[in-house]
Amino acid sequence: MYLADISADVLARAAKIRLAVFDVDGTLTDGRLWYGEDGHETKVFHVHDGLGLKRLMANGVQVAIISARISHPVALRAEELDIAHVYQGQGDKRACLDQLLEALALSPEEVAFVGDDLPDLPPMRIVGLAVAVANAHPWVAEQAHWQTTHGGGLGAAREVADVILHAQGKSDAERGRWQ
């Protein structure tokens, strides 16, 4: 399993996380944009990612979404998962993150940011745990503290959740909850 391959540095960073922030397109989805004949957008989200986000929140780690695009399916998925911090149409993700940190009284070291492409670099540069999904642009991957083995929309968010819960000593309780 991928947890055995996580470096001590990444685990130490993950142990401090109180807020996990996710980009959407290419991170919570596979990055493809689907449009119906009527012009309405459709997105596909992975059920494993959703449960991972819910498990983070159930274990005291807040979850946020910061996306440059505005999409009704994102709002629906966030509502379904009870994600309170959803910011769409954010051209400056770093500024949005700064405002969120101030509102939640968190330091950057207590934040993980998960992304895949160039607009994600500014917030990734300031957080305690910068994560690139497996299919991230190479410039993003080289700036990350860690890169997932799963691609965006294919379980990468669940992988991040599992690592954070593991680093915080909550994996055994989570496993026991389901047995």
Image: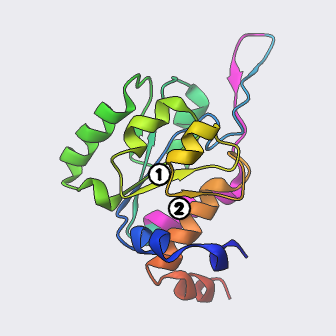
Toward which corner of the image does residue 3 lie, by quadrant?
Answer: bottom right
Asked if the magenta segment contains residue 69, the reply would be: no
Q: Position of residue 124 (x, y in %)?
A: 42, 45
Foreground mark, 2 or 1, reads 2
56 within the magenta span = yes
> Which image quarter holds the C terminus?
bottom right
Query: The residue tagged with tag 1: helix, strand or loop?
Result: loop
Task: Count residues near mark 1 (Cα–Cα under 10 Å), then give few for <14, some for 14-19, many for 20+.
Answer: few
Residue pictured at 33% horizontal, 47% vertical: 126
> In this view of the protein, which residue sits in the foreground, 129 or 62?
129
Please give the residue where the numbered disc 1 appears in the rendered image: 82
Q: Which residues are magenta?
A: 38-57
Question: Residue at 78% of width from left, 17% of height from top?
Answer: 36
Expressed as whole percent of the image width and height from the top left, the position of residue 1 reads 73, 76
Q: Callout 2: few (<14), some (14-19), or many (20+) C-alpha neighbours within 10 Å?
A: some
Residue 131, percent from left and from top: 52, 53
Q: Is residue 169 above or below residue 103?
A: below
Percent position of residue 5, x then y: 65, 75
Contact between marks 2 and 1 (CB within 8 A): the answer is: yes
Task: Give the quadrant of residue 178.
Answer: bottom right
Nearer to us in this view, 36 or 32 = 32
Query: Rounded to the nearest whole Å, what is the CA distance between mark 2 and mark 1?
Result: 8 Å
Marker count (numbered): 2
Q: Which residue is mark 2?
A: 54
Extreme residue toward the right, this view: 37
Q: What residue is drawn where x is 69% and y is 44%?
A: 45
